[in-house]
Amino acid sequence: MEWKNKAENWLQYKQLEADLLEQLNQIRTDEKALEEAFYKNLEFGTGGMRGEIGVGTNRMNTYTIRKASSGLASYIESKGEEAKARGVAIAYDSRHKSKEFALETAKTFASRGIKAFLFQELRPTPELSFAIRYLNAYSGVVITASHNPPEYNGYKVYGPDGAQLPPEAADIVINYIENIEDELVLEVQNEKELINQGLIQMVGDEIDRAYQEKLLTISENPQLSTKTDIKVVFTPLHGTANKPAREALKALGYKHVHVVAEQELPDPQFSTVKSPNPEEHAAFELAIRDGNHLGADILIATDPDADRLGIAVKNHEGEYVVLTGNQTGALLLDYILSQKEEKGTLPKNGIVFKTIVTSELGRKIASSFQIKTEDVLTGFKFIAEKIEQYQSSREYTFLFGYEESYGYLIGDFARDKDAIQATLLATEVCAYYQNMGITVYEGLMNIYKKYGYYLEGLRSLTLKGKEGAETIQAILTSFRNENLKKLGSFNIVAAEDYLTSKRETSKGTEDILLPKSNVLKYIFEDGSWICLRPSGTEPKVKFYFGVNGENMEETKQKLTELEQVFMDLVDQKLKLVSA
């Protein structure tokens, strides 16, 4: 069997790192564990790769890092000497082995004659995105597994515009990687020699200062910090946002920023939380404790690589509630547009970007300001791609981009979702409402009263292994083959298939002008919708729901009904395809 040959190859490799050799010896008699480590190569997708740290071709380790970096190096070499000279910016987060993997990445590029700009300490993902264009680098890499469990790490790749690689470029890189047969033969030169040759350059402070300067430009009303006295509880969840977020808040004049002590410092085990994910309400447990003690107006949490942000605010009963990504996005968007309109700085050709699974409330808000909203596929690289496109054509001026999964971008000096930016603006929104004499929660309720009540839901079906993947595909095929017209009391007026790029309505067929993707979406008569999307990183299919109504109670009932009737249909299909 091929995986046994791979395992034997690693066992015979005399230069194998000592810790990996020890792990390999521990599992060499455990056939199941050995197969799991070697039965495939760790997959490199359109956004990079992510996996458990350990020995084997299916794990994150020095050798799989070299393989990925070598494939990217070949891609850069294919672009010529100028691309090699412009080089690659490299950052890393607080996870196990992140620093070591970042150095290995830098040595791989430098050994191929490609300049490597390596951050001397951990940095947020959005700062890496900023650094690429600041340095005029040709590419970028950040070592992170975002909010995955502690045993994971990852490798995300960026292009010259500071955005994650688009599918076409990613496919070329993947091809180069897959053509490398043996990752063990990829050798690198000594770190000190590469630094002395100028091929590895350590960076940090200068880029920090430039990034901080740009962060301050997103404020619509810098004077609010002196007009209010808001109390903020902030937690970086053991990740990279601690220093840059606090520095920027201080520069804007916010004096009462309390950091959750147990979660302030980097900790690769994320020992105070089950999951270091601000989407999870449990991640706010210690922030809520401190918030209640201090009487905080807003609680803010960022994930380990600081590209996602969650907030919690007090409701009418005085209890902290964690807002959804859609609710936070609505608050930020309404604030940006209203303040720009008030100051006369709202461009007539402004545009907002959201994903196809993000709330329609954003479109309703933007429309009230005569601002266009454009949908993109799930993945922030598609928002970044549109920013670059319209910046070049000058057709539209970027104002805001967001996705329901807690990712926001305000200033396009970064081209990935930026939780540091969002931290500053969320704080300012809180100060704005306090200056008006109301809470953030009351501000959100006012948005609902003005634009309508919008609620969203998410369900998922996890089916592991090869059989599970086939079942997920069979369920989507079943939906494609069934010409759904009605779902309970909901009448379907449009069916969108992003794999065929077709939108079917009673008036006929329209083209969907987005990249192909294995996604289905149904739109109902009242504007409600459902979207089916297999996960790109996990063995699951996700079902997104969006509804709207005249009041909160009606909207909640509608969401419950739509979720129930649809999941019943999914269960029926699951039984049929599994029979």
Image (spheres, rainbow, N blue to C red):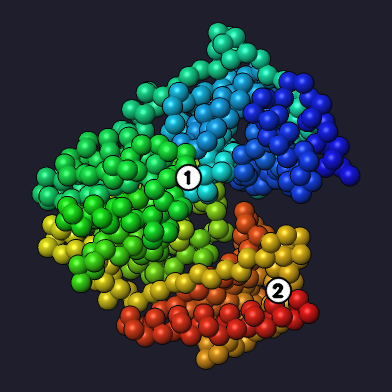
Image coords of residue 213 (percent x, y):
31, 33
Name the amino acid type tagged 2: Ile
Between 11 and 254, the one lying in front of the other is: 11
Foreground: disc 1 or disc 2: 2
Residue 194 falls left or right of residue 466 = left
Q: Earlier in the sequence, mark 1 or mark 2?
A: 1
Question: Extreme right residue here?
Answer: 1
Q: Which residue is mark 2?
A: 475
| Residue drawn at the location 67% of the way across and 40% of the way down | 59
Q: Which residue is mark 1?
A: 416
Image coords of residue 414 (percent x, y):
43, 40
Seen in the picture, residue 25 relative to 221 is either above or below; the reply is above
| Residue drawn at the location 76% of the way across and 44% of the way down | 30
Quarter that holds the C terminus: bottom right
Residue 473 falls left or right of residue 142 = right
Between 225 and 497, the one lying in front of the other is: 225
Q: From mark 1 to mark 2, how far is it between C-alphas? A: 32 Å
| Residue drawn at the location 39% of the way across and 81% of the way down | 556
